Image (tube, rainbow, N blue to C red):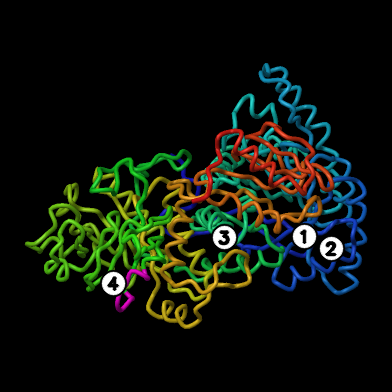
Amino acid sequence: MQLYCNSLTQFSRLKTREVKVGNLLLGNGHPIRVQTMTTTDTLDTIATVEQAIRCIEAGAELVRITAPSKNEAENLLHIKNELRKRGYTTPLVADIHFTPNAAEIAAKIVEKVRVNPGNYVDKKKFEQIDYTDAEYLEEIERIRDRFTPLVKICKEHGTAMRIGTNHGSLSDRIMSRYGDTPIGMVESAMEFLRIARAEDYHNILLSMKSSNPQVMVQAYRLLVQQMQQEFGECYPLHLGVTEAGDGEDGRVKSAAGIGTLLEDGIGDTIRISLTEDPEFEIPVCRDLVKRYTNLPDKGVIPTIEKVPYDPFHYKRRTSFAVGNIGGNQVPVVIADFSKVDKITPEHLVAIDYKYDAHTDKWNIGDAAADYIFTGHQIIDFALPGTLKVIVYPATWLVCADKEKYFPLFDAAGYTSSTEKSNLLNLVMLDCFNDETPVNDFTYLDQFANDPTVVIGLSSKNKHAMPAVRRMLMELMNQNVLNPVVLITDSNWHTPDEHLLHYSTECGALLLDGLGDGICLGMSANSYTEQINTNSLDTGGRNYQKNQSVEQFINSSAFSILQATRTRISKTEYISCPSCGRTLFDLQETTAKIRSVTNHLKGVKIAIMGCIVNGPGEMADADFGYVGSGVGKITLYKSKEVVKKNIDSEIAVEELINLLKETGTWVDPA
């Protein structure tokens, strides 16, 4: 199998062509550039300029502005002139959807245009399901005729272009042949890229965006593979998870998708699409990118000859079950309470267990951790029935309840121990630690396929994810079927840094089907810093203030599992980041919808600002709330219109009615 990156064991940026966007160089080993998109009305010159300046001063290296029609495209000149007059030279990008003439105008003004091959020329009416080969080729020629003028304008004016495919806006022709698939996304972009190359135009970037990180990652990998096979080279890649949402969920979903690719050296520019003011996106982008600035040139992770899984199609690694870990069961969450001096029932509120003294019962929430690690501590009160405890071996030996408590060993300790649980033993491996390299396979045969052993994988390697992945590949190649828990500690400082770290390290593995549970933790210094600040609010929306470290980590764990579609524990919101086309206050509306639907576990609700993004980019949502005019909302079930042009004042109520009519609604507890 041809790899989609330079190496699975040694960090190395993917070699791509150099592209010039104004005075900015991308690809070819240049730094990963960060960008965002304005949310103002493009016809409001001053508002757009001032928001662009806030983004630039936050660190944006490119600023994208929507140009849905000829008028907005023409006004880009006034916006650009005003920015230049104020001393800002940051390249501008025009975002085009359905209107080729707007793209042709914009390409003469700004430094870059973005076109979506799914709706730039191609049809999305689903009037024709089957295409003969001749009809298919005829459509390609029609696209060539309509797209080539833009290519020639870009070539003449030195304008860059992004060919940006969206999972949810594939044309009926692509859907008819490839379906709603990653390979369909790739072919949609490749058709446009081939036309541009035929004109000897190469100042091009590409993107493969989806609201589903799994689809997004597979599409980028396939695109790299296809470009290498067909052209022998790759064009720079713009990474993004579309409609990621806001707050913690938006950051987790974005980091899981974008971070997975960055881990393997893929990506030349990124945009994190949050339903927040665009300047809030930039610090998150910078936190994600800075992880890849000081990685070692070479490491101790052994190369791999045979990749034992298909990175282009999801399949969960086969494992047997040890208790409720592994097999076909959803991944478990282990909460780290080892830094809590004296655990009380109140502490368990952080992991969604609430004790009611009047009834002497525990209320268990959807985000209730499955295990807690207490280190040396035995808990002196009756635990909820579903919660089990992991402790160090010496503590386990003196525990009275061997049905509730289980030991954690290192590999050498488990091998030499004469006292082990006959139910569950967690055996830790530090994968390819680059400080004290050892043969990490030394003890593996001592507990491989032991029916009581769950393997805990972590790594002190400076690039930990590929170290853990390499060990998982070794397990697969040796047919070791023990379930695996991913152990990830963070040495970062801010909430965003921790969240992005966890989401990238665990998300990259879970998206490839690797992992039967996760346990997140912080270094002692980071933990102390968080306790001292006693607040996890960084200015982004929906961080809950004054939560404990344990609550933050537990919430992060369940959000990562949700984002990777491996364990669904809450409602999922597919919310666009707003732009000049938006027809209502997205942030306010998202918050309002969330407040009345966040108890609907497993339901996916898309909240889209306009009809351009709506039915297409909400992709696999169960329900859609889409702006269809000023003060008007259209409701969708899947991709079908159910209620059209509803007054926005009653639209949320009508959404609830739709949920009730379809049998989806349940009353809040």
Q: Type of residue at label 3?
A: Arg
Q: Residue at x 52, y 50 (%)?
A: 668
Between 201 and 361, the residue placed more toward the observer is 361
Compute the Cα span from label 2 to label 4. Answer: 53 Å
Residue 663: x and y in percent read 55, 34
Residue at 80% in and 66% down: 51
First along the sequence among labels 4 and 1 = 1
Q: Earlier in the sequence, mark 2 or mark 1?
A: 1
Q: What label sits on residue 436 in the rendered view?
A: 4
Vertical relation: 265 (above or below) 85:
above
Instruction: Tell me: 443 left or right of 113.
Output: left
Q: Is residue 316 left or right of residue 236?
A: left
Q: Earlier in the sequence, mark 1 or mark 3?
A: 1
Disc 2 from disc 1: Cα separation: 7 Å
Q: Secondary structure at mark 4?
A: loop
Give the amino acid type for the residue marked by disc 2 in the picture: Thr
First-in-chain label (4 vs 3): 3
Where does the image place residue 90, in percent across and percent down from the top left? 78, 66
Horizontal and vertical percent position of residue 211 = 60, 46
For the record, the magenta segment spans 339-347
Indicate yes or no whether the magenta region holds residue 259: no
